[in-house]
Amino acid sequence: MANTPDTGRENAPPQREGVLANASELEEWFLREVLPLESMLMRYLQHNWRNESDIKDMLQDIYVRVCESAAKEFPRATRPFVFTTARNLLLNRLRDAQVVPIEAVADVEALQVAVDEPGPDQAAAARDELRRLQAALDRLPPRAREALVLRQVEGLSRREIAKAMGIGEETVKDHLSAGLRLLSAMFFSEPADFRRRP
Amino acid sequence: MSADPRDALDAASIEARASDWVIARKTSEDWTGADQEALDAWLAGSMAHRIAYWRMNQAWSQTNRLAALRRSEARDKQPAPARAGVLPNMLKIAAVFVAVAALGIGAAYRLAAPRDRVFSTPVGGHEVVNFADGSSIELNTNTALRARMTTDQRIVWLQKGEAYFRIKHDSTHPFIVMVDGHRVTDLGTEFLVRRGARNLEVAVMQGRVTFDAPDSHTPSQIALLTAGEVATADTATDRIRVSKMALQELTDELGWRNGVLVFNHTRLAEAAAEFNRYNREKLVIRDAAVANLEIGGTFQANNIEAFTDVAQHILNLHVEYHGREIVVTR
């Protein structure tokens, strides 16, 4: 029970670099080091790719490449690795599409500087979290918000929510699921400014 | 992995599936082994699936924090914890319940006879088993039992954990729960049996049961329990103690059937122990002063984060993660 995540490896180095990741380590790493970069990645992709409808797929491609690589070996430094992956993907897409000159991606270098800035102050982030959550909930469609509040604030079961809202349980699930997707975009994809100072 | 045909799905569709899975997993009242297998299979389908699921799961966890803080606010305003959401429902279910917690894990149980069926749940699991006679057994976290349901016998051996029994009464074929040498016999009833580390507990929500230790060396006591009564057996002495429990306490104790834990001025150490029954991550509180702090409110049993958030933001404690240990200190 007292095991650290390093247990089971011989002479585990202090950093995870160069170590084969198991599934939960990979998840932890992704959530801790990659996901917080999402808003910056989105900004980068949106800036360099005109077709908004491709962005989600591109983000997924980047995540998959980054995680498949990390599953073999964790990168030395996550941020530069993630953004290099993003740039390579972008360059490939531009080459394939042959619509935008490659020079368009040049300002990735400028962005790389911002990428190396320290992350948001964890304590401040925690303090703002409640307000941020409420603000996010307020932006949801009414039915999704209602279902989420009944579940997560009032602690009702799916059956009870269905009764309270006068809808079927399957519809409750749909509302919760749709609400969750919108929240995930607000939490992770939107600019850090919003996330830090709602 | 990238060759998986399901990768062909666009990111938005994968994301939708992922959020559906998270909602199904987090809000299901009867998440079964088959459900988990289906989820595992989907996750194994591709890295994109896993990442989308991790991300959605993380978003869901963030919404948990709102609940934790809200409840604590409610508690501060009002001495009674915010259990209103759960209680009315529980009262409707209300019936009989029997809790048993047992000393001595090594209770000798024979190899299961071929006609016996074995049911179990992992840590954090929750499963309902329905029988042909109309009875049902609801298994709480980390529970194992063996059931012999034949035309002439209805016996369940509770090997570990806790289960809620809703029994279709049949006076010619009594339903019997055996737990560490003790016997619970239904007389038309709903009851809870818990086999804990130190004692056995039987709590009756509806109807009546008898509770005894038939093979005991000491002269056997037989207790008749009616609704609202709780019997605790000390297996070292086979002494059975019966006490009345307030209906609210009984319904709180059954919160797990809705996936929640209800605390009311509960010591932090006890609340942590309850969470630890449901989660692979274990809360550790070594400081006696911290252990004696009180907590109130309704929590999702699988949501340790809600607990750590209250500890950090309301009680101003420190929370450190060491692998699967979550150490709470001043």
Image: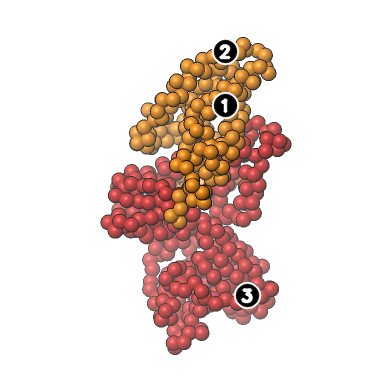
Chain colours: A orange, B red
Whether residues under marks 3 and 2 lie with C-beta atoms below 8 angstroms apart, the answer is no
Q: Nearer the viewer, residue B168 or B318?
A: B318
Q: Residue B2 location in percent, x, y? A: 68, 35
Q: Residue B41 location in percent, x, y? A: 66, 47
Name the residue that disc number 1 marks. A85
Q: CA distance from mark 3 to mark 1?
A: 57 Å
The answer to whether residue A180 is visible is no
Q: CA distance from mark 2 to mark 1?
A: 17 Å
Answer with the quarter of the image where residue B64 lies: top left
Image quadrant holding the C terminus of chain A, namely: top left
Q: Residue B74 location in percent, x, y? A: 34, 47
Name the residue that disc number 2 marks. A104
The residue shown at (41%, 30%) is: A119
Answer with the quarter of the image where residue B10 lies: top right
Give the foreground label among 2 and 1.
1
Which amino acid type corresponds to the residue marked 1 in the rendered image?
Thr
> Along the horizontal axis of the image, is A159 left or right of A129?
right
The answer to whether residue A103 is visible is yes
**Neighbourhood count class around disc 1 (C-alpha, 10 Å): few under 14, some 14–19, many 20 upward:** some
**Neighbourhood count class around disc 3 (C-alpha, 10 Å): few under 14, some 14–19, many 20 upward:** few
Which amino acid type corresponds to the residue marked 2 in the rendered image?
Ala
**Neighbourhood count class around disc 2 (C-alpha, 10 Å): few under 14, some 14–19, many 20 upward:** few
Q: CA distance from mark 3 to mark 2?
A: 72 Å
Check chain identity for marks 3 and 1: say if they share one: no
Mark 2 lies on a secondary structure that is helix
Image quadrant holding the N terminus of chain A, namely: bottom left
Check chain identity for marks 3 and 2: say if they share one: no
The subunit carrying tag 3 is B
Name the residue that disc number 3 marks. B111
The residue shown at (57%, 13%) is: A104
